[in-house]
Image (cartoon, grey):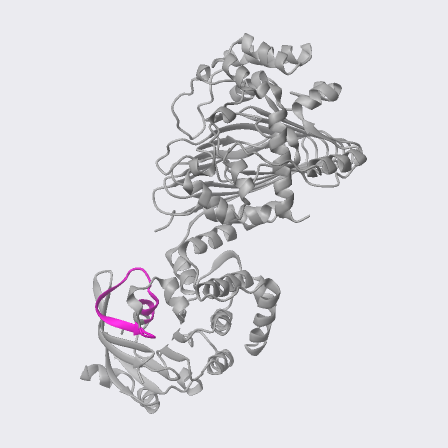
Amino acid sequence: MSAMLKIEGLEASVEGKAVLKGIDLAVPAGEVHAIMGPNGSGKSTLGYVLAGREGYEVTGGSVTFRGEDLLAMEPEDRAAAGLFLAFQYPVELPGVGNANFLRQALNALRRKRGEPELDAMQFLKLVRGKMKALGMTEEMLKRFVNVGFSGGEKKRNEILQMAVLEPAFCILDETDSGLDIDALKIVADGVNALRAPERGMLVITHYQRLLTYIVPDRVHVLLGGRIVRSGGPELALELEEKGYGELQQAA
Amino acid sequence: MPAAAETIDTVRDVTEASYKWGFESQIEQDIIPKGLDEDVIRLISAKKGEPGWLLEWRLKAFRAWQAMEPPRWAAVSHPPIDFQDISYYAAPKQKAAPKSLDEIDPELLRTYEKLGIPLKEQERLAGVAVDAVFDSVSVATTFKEKLAEAGVIFCSFSEAVREHQELVRRYLGSVVPAADNFYAALNSAVFSDGSFVYVPRGVRCPMELSTYFRINARNTGQFERTLIIAEPGSYVSYLEGCTAPMRDENQLHAAVVELIALDEATIKYSTVQNWYPGDAEGRGGIYNFVTKRGACRGAKSKISWTQVETGSAITWKYPSCILQGEGSVGEFYSVAITNNRQQADTGTKMIHLGRDTRSTIVSKGISAGQGQNTYRGLVRIMPKADRARNFTQCDSLLIGDRCGAHTVPYIESRNPTAKVEHEATTSRIAEDQLFYCRQRGLSEEEAVGLIVNGFCREVLAVLPMEFAVEAQKLLAISLEGSVG
């Protein structure tokens, strides 16, 4: 079976500095892969490059997503193709209602996919169900996108967007950062609920902690812009014990 | 009746009406040459069959205007206007009317499509001479009947001069004197037509009044005159403009609007201004030099200005309130967008004369392309205005790095018990905001529209419902192509 997301020899630089130096990675549908690594290893850059952020220049390699050349697409077309990035630092949109934002995003995706748009009532019905599962209050729909949200609320909001938009592939960029253990469990439950045979996930994290709750199928260690080791879930535990130091020396 | 059908009917009425005007005939267009002197003014007045006092008023304004200079203090630049090179009467629109939509700038038509404007309506907006089949049941007529029941007078200015002369004579120029400023004086001398509203004591006007529904409102030309009088305890909401860009050959527009609110009366005046802004290189476009002023004459009266300004090459406009009555309230909510080469110098004046008067100013300026956006405001507290209060908030949003935002607030307080607050912010649409929206599936244009609408939320929230939705679309359209 061919992988849903296939990265080959991916090289990228930020402000002229090489950050990704040849990444090879294949994530099949139905699997959850974790990318682990210390700060500055290129984890977040990988997420941004895949999502198509400006300023992240691809200098080599290729990425195929569901059989298509991902790197040739605009960010919004990547989203329409089913790629979702849960941000490490979700962005504030002052004056933009959370519900309005989410509905516009959902309808933009539905339009691109040739599906009918949801009206306000249909949307509310959909979103209410998803919020309940994430322990979110409806009051959060009325607030402006991420404005004045606590760290935990922001991350939950990302997961809510993910749950509503139902992407084919999710990239979670350090979703565990800034979460206490209770919030972490809620977020992990939300993510686990989205695990499905037709959906792939890439979980980017610094710590093993998150992987206790979201158990990955594969773990990859990113160091200095390269994947230096891959293994099963036990690799995360090993890293937790020994740290990245040993691998850094080996790299 | 569904809005679209209603619109089409109204359009037919409007079209029909313009043909009814005998003096818009081809022959007379040829008679009146460009240029302005006393004879032209006499001719305008004679054609309209005006009473002698109004002609005298016009002539007085003209003589004052001759001694005046165009204002130079605004932060806008344009070549000098040759006032002798303008035709002050006739209907140049009809002479220049394109025969079909094929002759219209496709860019303009694309905008209409985005706004979801029916075809007939598109033709009217684009200035096409529409051969409409007239509907015997006219929306405008039923509308007028309903207003008449309530005792509200809503008619063209010309009709008001004929039918309600005493009211016009009493109030005309009482808020904006004939020689108030260069453009107001010019308007007073040559104004062609406009709107007149009178709401009797204690009457709450049963519907939003819009020029849209008033049959004689179209083709009022460059020098429009509006007068609204709200008797004690009355309420009226007036909508000006329509929510699609109007094609217009007139380069210069100089309108005057006067509002009078007596004891405990409220006037809410909303404008969506989207005249042709010129092309991306700054060719063409309307010069919009408007004097709008409201007098809160009565105790606890209230005048509220709301404007969404997305059009015109140059906007020079300061809707103001004279807060004379004790406890009267003035409000100004504004969104002004400048894209490409547009220039806007706009704001308000709040003149506090009476005790316990209050004013609120919320101004949102958005600059994109090489647009220049200036907020210019004056809050003046006079010695007798005990406990007067003002709150001003001026926010600027920049899109791109070639545009400009400027804030010029004047505050003059001559009463120690007054309280004046001013807040100002300048921000930019950040790359991370755009990326966040696009990652969720919105196009760049949709993302900008969303962020801009969020920025303008406080102003859009006070627009009447009919306007708010279309205004939101319009904001997004005005900023198309401003990013990337």
Give the magenta part as a residue range.
Answer: A47-67
Q: Is residue A251 visible?
A: yes
Where in the figure is residue B192, as x and y percent of width and height? 59, 21
Please say if B321 is above or below A1. above
Where in the figure is residue B104, as x and y percent of width and height? 44, 37
Q: Quadrant of the C terminus of chain A?
A: bottom left
**B142 horizontally vs A61: left or right:** right
Where in the figure is residue A3, as x and y percent of width and height? 31, 81
A167 vs A110, nearest the viewer: A110
Please say if B222 is above or below B41. below
A66 vs B75, nearest the viewer: A66
Based on the picture, tell me whether residue A227 belongs to the magenta stretch: no
Q: Residue furthest left?
A: A250
Quarter occupied by residue B106: top left
Residue found 49% across the figure and 47% down from its top: B113
Please say if B461 is above or below B291. below
**B157 horizontally vs B476: left or right:** right
**B479 horizontally vs B186: left or right:** left
Q: Residue furthest top?
A: B39
Q: Quadrant of the N terminus of chain A?
A: bottom left
Based on the picture, tell me whether residue A58 belongs to the magenta stretch: yes
Report how many numbered discs are placed on residues in the image. 0
B135 vs A97, nearest the viewer: B135
Quarter occupied by residue B333: top right
Q: Is residue B179 visible?
A: no
Where in the figure is residue B334, as x and y percent of width and height? 55, 41
Please say if A143 is above or below B448. below
Residue found 64% across the figure and 47% down from its top: B3
